[in-house]
Image (cartoon, helix red, strand yellow):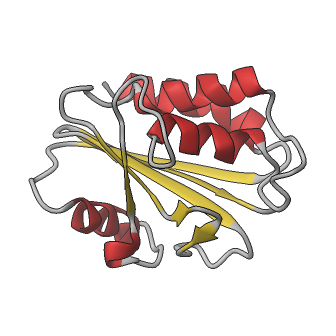
Amino acid sequence: MDEAFRQFAARWLPLLNNGARAQFHHRIGPIMPAPHSEIADGFIGGLGFAKIGFNWELLDALPGADGPRSAWAQMEQALAGDIANPARPWLAQADAAACARDFIALFDPERRTLVANRYDGLWNPIAGAAVEWAFVGFDDKAIALLLITDT
């Protein structure tokens, strides 16, 4: 299982770090049941990032989900537009979609939860960057953070 996370980082971090600063952290091991905000805060707090509590936006992680809370749509939006100026392109749409798909696929579809620190153009900072977008995904066996900040 850990290999999938390492492959994600090896494939995507070089591309994501071209035009932004991207960090990817993960932990393999049992995730004890708790509210999504507590799980996300516990993980990122352990990495030294600020906890944001109930400000984590719970995303719809179902394949084909549509609308503003779709994990796929949120991640594609975050990756396709420049972090500091979303009107400017960053990754090609196909790359943004593939990266989102690969991140979400790290987690068991029957048990996965995805949250973001940003919704509808506003964000709740965890890293103290001028502009940032964070995604935390988890299931019962693993958790990961994909954090994108301006350079």
Which residue is most to the left? Answer: 33
Indicate whether 44 appears above or below 74.
Answer: below
Judge from the rendering whether residue 123 lies leftward or rightward of residue 105; answer left or right.
right
Indicate whether 20 appears above or below 119.
Answer: above
The picture places residue 65, in percent across and down from the top left corner, at: 41, 31
Identity of the residue drawn at 66% across and 43% down: 77
Judge from the rendering whether residue 99 lies leftward or rightward of residue 80; answer left or right.
left
Query: Residue 28 or 97: which is nearer the viewer?
Result: 97
The picture places residue 71, in percent across and down from the top left corner, at: 46, 41
Query: Residue 36 or 30: which is nearer the viewer?
Result: 36
**Image quadrant assignment for residue 43:** bottom left
The tally of labels here is 0
Identity of the residue drawn at 39% across and 73% down: 55
| Quadrant in which the C terminus appears | bottom right
Query: Residue 127 or 112: which is nearer the viewer?
Result: 112
Identity of the residue drawn at 56% across and 45% down: 74
Identity of the residue drawn at 24% across and 59% down: 36
The picture places residue 48, in percent across and down from the top left corner, at: 45, 74
| Quadrant in which the N terminus appears | top left
Judge from the rendering whether residue 44 lies leftward or rightward of residue 111; answer left or right.
right
Which residue is most to the right? Answer: 88
Indicate whether 129 appears above or below 26.
Answer: below
